[in-house]
Amino acid sequence: MANFNKVILLGNLTRDPQLSYLPSQMAVVDFGLAVNRNWTGQDGQKKQEVCFVDCRAFGKTAENINKYCKKGNPLFIEGRLTFDQWTTQEGQKRSKHRITVMSFQFLPSGGSSGREQDSSPEPEQEFSGNHGSENNAPSGNDDIPF
């Protein structure tokens, strides 16, 4: 039976990242992410739901998140869902789900609506720039060369 565990989230940090180190000196950062869902109900009222998610990253990923992110910053993360279990000092069993971050992308902050701009080239621009000198077909040719 096949298994697949991948989580993709885009949200805002709910607190400043908290950096610590394992005994092996590997960096670990814990942070919270708030992911909003907006919709209009059947009664026409606008509604909002917020999902708070605990996240953890390791190594260089942890160091970069700690260095460049702070409470309120938007962050795009990809990771996997993990299930943590522990026993409190009082002997009570506790558990929670957490996202283990495998990769992330910084996002521009601000309240601009529409498409966010960044300094990276558009995929079409990059493709046409690299492909144009190699393609000897006349312009206007509807055939797609493979």
Image (cartoon, helix red, strand yellow):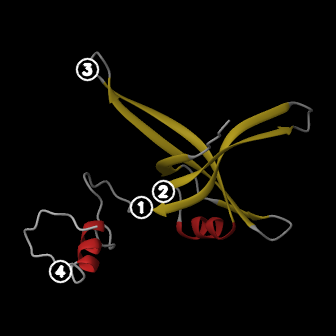
Image: 39 above or below 141: above
Is there CB contact under 8 Å for labels 2 and 1? yes
Q: CA distance from mark 1 to mark 4?
A: 39 Å
Q: Amino acid at mark 3?
A: Gly
1 vs 4, front mark? 4
Quarter holding the N terminus is top right
2 vs 4, front mark? 4
Under circle 1, the secondary element is loop
Q: Amino acid at mark 1?
A: Leu
Q: Which one is nearer the viewer's eye here, 82 or 141?
A: 141
Rate crowding at label 3 as few (under 14), some (14 to 19) or many (20 or more) other CA atoms within 10 Å. Answer: few
Residue topped by disc 2? 75
Is there CB contact under 8 Å for labels 3 and 2? no
Q: Amino acid at mark 4?
A: Asn
Residue topped by disc 4? 136
Image: 36 above or below 145: above
Q: Amino acid at mark 2?
A: Leu
Relative to 99, 137 lies left or right? left
Residue topped by disc 3? 44
Q: Which mark is residue 22?
A: none
Is there CB contact under 8 Å for labels 3 and 1? no
Q: Which mark is residue 107?
A: 1
Q: CA distance from mark 2 to mark 1?
A: 6 Å
